[in-house]
Image (cartoon, rainbow, N blue to C red):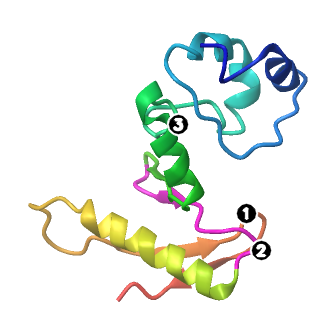
């Protein structure tokens, strides 16, 4: 089972070096990563089954392929706000627009069948350190 993570990689994580964007693991390997939860957790790198980064060994290759293809993950906070990353500064306007449309389609697909009225009340988009812009939801 140690073929996925070695002592050298664990030592790098322990020293705070996290030069990766996503970390996939299997449930068998999770106990080796638990001591590094305080490093990985605040950076949203700790594997989690809700996000799809904690997978069975047979599903590992498929999860990696989905991530490389640009799978968008989103979360909803207690105030019913949706948080999602749709791109990076290196993306073109067309790529950002395509990712935004994909996110909106995924949210519409998750709309409860019995829900009446408006599903989206207001929308804003912003960069990590920049101002926000109001979206026209209609």
Decide whether residue 90 is among the magenta residues: yes
CA gap between label 2 and label 3 equals: 24 Å
Q: Position of residue 111 (x, y in %)?
A: 23, 62
Q: Position of residue 102 (x, y in %)?
A: 43, 72
Report the side of 82 relative to 90 (left or right): left
Q: Earlier in the sequence, mark 2 or mark 3?
A: 3
Vertical comparison of 108 with 59: above or below: below
Q: Which residue is mark 2?
A: 90
Q: Which residue is mark 1?
A: 128
CA gap between label 1 and label 3 equals: 23 Å
Front in this rendered view, residue 130 or 5 = 5
Q: Which residue is mark 3?
A: 53
Q: Which residues are magenta?
A: 79-91
Q: Is label 1 in contact with label 3 (beta carbons under 8 Å)?
A: no
Report crowding for label 2: few under 14, some 14 to 19, many 20 or more residues within 10 A (C-alpha): few
Vertical comparison of 116 with 71: above or below: below
How would you classify the magenta stretch by its main secondary structure? loop
Q: Earlier in the sequence, mark 2 or mark 1?
A: 2
Q: Secondary structure at mark 1?
A: loop
Front in this rendered view, residue 73 or 24 = 24
Q: Secondary structure at mark 2?
A: loop
Looking at the image, which residue is at 51% across and 80% down?
Answer: 98
Q: Is label 2 in contact with label 3 (beta carbons under 8 Å)?
A: no
Report the side of 75 relative to 6 (left or right): left
Residue at the outermost left position: 114
């Amino acid at each position: 089972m140690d073929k996925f993570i070695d002592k050298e990689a664990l030592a790098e994580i322990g020293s705070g070096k996290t030069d990766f964007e996503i970390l996939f693991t299997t449930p068998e390997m999770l106990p080796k990563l638990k001591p590094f939860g305080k490093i990985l957790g605040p950076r949203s790198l700790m594997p989690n089954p809700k996000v799809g980064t904690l997978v069975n060994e047979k599903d590992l290759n498929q999860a990696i392929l989905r991530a490389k293809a640009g799978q968008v993950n989103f979360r909803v906070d207690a105030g019913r706000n949706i948080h999602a990353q749709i791109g990076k500064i290196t993306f073109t306007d067309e790529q950002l627009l395509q990712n935004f449309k994909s996110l909106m389609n995924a949210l519409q697909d998750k709309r409860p069948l019995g829900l009446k009225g408006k599903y989206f009340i207001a929308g804003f988009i912003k960069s990590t350190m920049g101002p926000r812009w109001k979206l026209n939801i209609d």
